Amino acid sequence: MKMTATSALALGFAILAAAAAAQERQTFTVGTATAARGQKAAGAIEVPAAADPALSIPVVVAHGAKPGPVLAIVAGAHGTEYASIVAVERLIATIDAAQLSGTVILVPLVNIPSFEKMVPHLNPVDGKNMNRFYPGRMDGTQTERASFLITKQVVEPCDHLIDMHGGDLDEDLRPYSYWTRTGREPLDRISREMALAFGLDHIIITTDRPTDPAASRYLENTATTRGKPSLTVEAGRAGTVEPGDVNALVNGSLSVMRYLKMLPGAPATVESPVWIASLANVTNEATGMFVPLVTRGAYAQQGMKVGYVTDYLGKVLFEARAPESGVILYIRAVPSAAKGDTLASIGVVQK
Ligand SMILES: [Zn+2]
């Protein structure tokens, strides 16, 4: 839908009005955590039991001594994307509410069952992907109830949101972020500037996300469809917690906070990122053992063999070839490869 100048202006005022309302709060509450001005408070978003068990999602609120916007930073929808979870733990320890303008809501680990059972991609309680069921519902399974309460208690009170991910146990990933282009201003300009301020040098432009706030599916898209400029970022890979990945996520978040004037100083903005116009995924056509032939970050020419799948005695069953030319954003990190699995994700560079 194309916006008129009037509706764009109304959206601009709505963003400013939301920020102004937050500035007046003496205390800020998320779940059971209530922070006074200049303080950090810990608590939980309590998801009640229904047909399946309850879930207690830990949350910290840092309510700045000075007024400013509300930023939500969420990780661990996929509980084995460890670098992103460790990064939010680090931010919880690092952020000093006495030095902060505005409020930060920090949720380091949404999918606790995935973390505890070491199950990639899904919540083992209900078998659902915890970044696909937003805005959620209270009469659903654990993932849907958690999504509903995160929408109400994290997304709705915030002005901006950063959703952190990374390569899961089976993904050898090079860092990148997503910028969602909606056609709405100033939403797109601010989210683009947030992506540049975050500092990852490969940025995927997404234009195909749902536009209906009642069917937003993704966490970042739940914020975006509610008029809040937001961002999804990815760093880390294959079960590792490497300092470079954690630092990129921590420093990127602090840089966005400088861009939003929540911290003093200038953001460390990436000047010339590689803009990714689309994704070309390679899907496995035969269950067996995967052998990669390229590493994350490599450039693959269209038709190039990026890996192959054999049976358990070494006979080649499937040759994985790049459907288009582009950057290997991630490649399968483990030999286990079922039919239908993604073997590689290739970012097609914007011309
Ligand atoms: Zn993820």
Image (tube, rainbow, N blue to C red):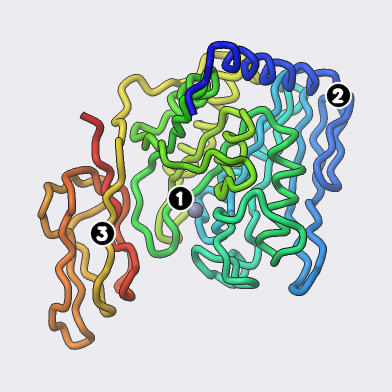
Sequence-first tag of 1 and 2: 2
Measured in 3D between alpha carbons, the distance from the residue under mark 1 to the one under mark 2, in whole angstroms, is 34 Å
Near-viewer residue (273 or 51): 51
Residue drawn 26% across the image and 79% down it: 288
Residue indicated by mark 1: 166
Amino acid under disc 3: Val
Q: Secondary structure at mark 3?
A: strand
Residue 325 against residue 257 in the figure, above or below: below
Residue 343 visible somewhere in the drawing: yes
Residue indicated by mark 2: 25
Residue drawn 75% across the image and 27% down it: 97
Indicate the position of residue 132 as horizontal and vertical percent values: 55, 55
Measured in 3D between alpha carbons, the distance from the residue under mark 1 to the one under mark 3, in whole angstroms, is 19 Å
Residue 184 against residue 217 in the figure, above or below: above
Residue 298 against residue 170 in the figure, above or below: above
Q: Nearer the viewer, mark 1 or mark 2?
A: 2
Amino acid under disc 1: Gly
Residue indicated by mark 3: 282
Measured in 3D between alpha carbons, the distance from the residue under mark 2 to the one under mark 3, in whole angstroms, is 49 Å
Residue 251 against residue 134 in the figure, above or below: above
